[in-house]
Amino acid sequence: MNYDISHSTFYGCKITSLARYKPPLSKLLIQYKENYDVELKSVFLSYYKSYLKIKFSGYSIVLVPSSLKKIKMREFDHLEMIFKELGLPILKVLSKKDGKEQKKNSASERKKVYQAINIHGGEVVSNKKILLVDDVITTGSTLKACLQLLKKYKPKRIEILTIMNVAPLEQYHK
Amino acid sequence: MDRNHFVCPRCGNSDPRYIGYRNNKPYCRKCIAFSGRKAEEIEHNRNIYLKLDYQLSELQREVSQRVLENYIANRDSLIKAITGAGKTELVYATMEYALKKKQNVGFAIPRRDVVIDLFPRIKSAFPNARVTYVIGEHSKVLTGDIILLTTHQLYRYRSYFDLLIVDEIDAFPYKGNDLLNKFLLDSVRGNMILLSATPSKEDLEKISQRGKIFEVNARYHHHPLPVPQFKRANISILFTCVKFLKKFLNDNKPVLIFCPTIDLCLKLYSKLKIFFPNGSIVHSEEKHRNLRVAMFKKRELKYLVTTSILERGITIDNLQVIVCFADHPLYDSSALIQIAGRVGRKVSHPNGKVIFIGEYINDSIRTCIEEITRTNTKAHMQNLLQ
């Protein structure tokens, strides 16, 4: 597997990514998300799991949202299944209005995504160490939108964890 | 339903190790990689014709005609054509016949890059046909008059093809894979033509039951196949390899040096490049391999150290081949025959050297040399050689 952990900064938050987005890991993620191969859920974090459990001990997880329609279609929340393995509390404060899938959008259309994500019950985030998680970071617009919503509720700190990054992490450095 | 009683309705798998659970419902993980859009039927409304810019040899024309007659009689064919026989052209006449009858025609190959290589050839042979290639990676279009595809993609075409041509049935990943085999058989509603230089006993048995086997034992230029020579590595493999490489490079001949693993390639190349700087290395994890192969073809690189990634499909004029660790367990006789088949493909230089370097002659090496010698003898008896 092409695991290759990297770190950088993203809008003032530390970001960690476990691998570049390419085969065989990318193929496995596609098989998991699009062919609904649920049994793969434990594969993605397996290589770094012990390290991640130590590094993010005391954090609460916030998932980047998938649309309710997709969760229903897949019959499972693919991110929740993966990150449950870390044994950290999961705060479901972000949700997404149904709309076009990100992967079908061009980069400019992706940047409008901030309008499509909502936060509710964000108070639970205050004063906590938050780990914002997603499977793939492509342009970063989705993560940026989530960060902006979370920061309003003044968490103690926010760190980001993605499984794969399409471009090298330094390119997202802002 | 529990693991031990579930049988997959798609692929028939009942092995509980391949059964997963989604919301407490079982699902089959063996064939899960074969999920996706299915191909629709389309109308073939063009009058498609074959256009060949070159002449087939008499042998090619004869076999081509007999294969067509076999297809018209609703039988399968297996063409056992040696490396460099020009086997693709042998099916053109049958393809033209099927296309004129508005049938669904497919051409399946185990490897993706060979599909891409074949595409321009088929397009120019059938200039007014809609030719599509389907290789995964979210191919949008699945239909056409002629569909080129990897054997993996056949799951999308259930009972679809009136004529399915399958090339390199002895190549990975198709070889020995039950699932791919099953999807292949399920995709054919008419007949198939299998192509191989080194078909297995099982392939031959299966076809002889319901079809015909055709042999092409001579290359289009009617020169015999070069027979490999075994050289025992007395001092070391490197030493023997250097000896032959030096001679070939002095004669200004391009050389391919095969090693069974990426690791052995890297080790060998790191030493060779000290003595011979104008070569390079090629393997599946090397990003620049296409560029290096192109440079080698243009003679800007004088030799390449390579894994079996270059075992098939490549044609270089006046090529010489050295196989290091030829007695390695990864080399079966088919692989060695394919590698030896890289030499002497062009009429300008129909002979060339194939050197097997190893510690001793094992069964694979012996079978390879015997099979090539036997093919040459057969060709000679059939009056096919100059």
Image: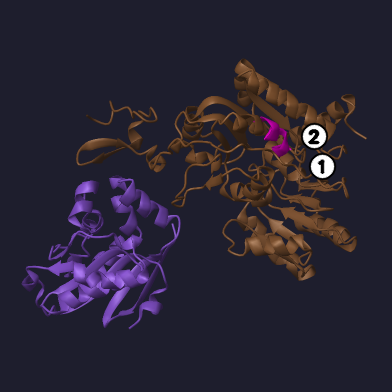
Q: How crowded is mark 2: few (under 14 residues within 10 Å), some or many (20 or more)?
A: many
Residue A85 sits in which quadrant? bottom left
The x, y position of residue A2, in whole percent, is 44, 60
- In the image, what residue type sits under mark 1? Pro
Which residue is depicted at the point 29% across and 36% down?
B27
- Mark 1 touching mark 2, by CB under 8 A? yes
Magenta residues span B87-94
- What amino acid type is highlighted by mark number 2? Ile
Label 2 is found on which chain of the structure? Answer: B
Q: What color is chain B drawn in?
A: brown
Chain A, chosen colour in render: purple
Q: Residue sitting at 79 percent across and 67 percent down?
A: B276
Question: Which residue is label 2 attached to?
Answer: B372
| Quarter holding residue A140 | bottom left
Q: Name the residue under label 1.
A: B228
The numbered dot on residue B80 is none
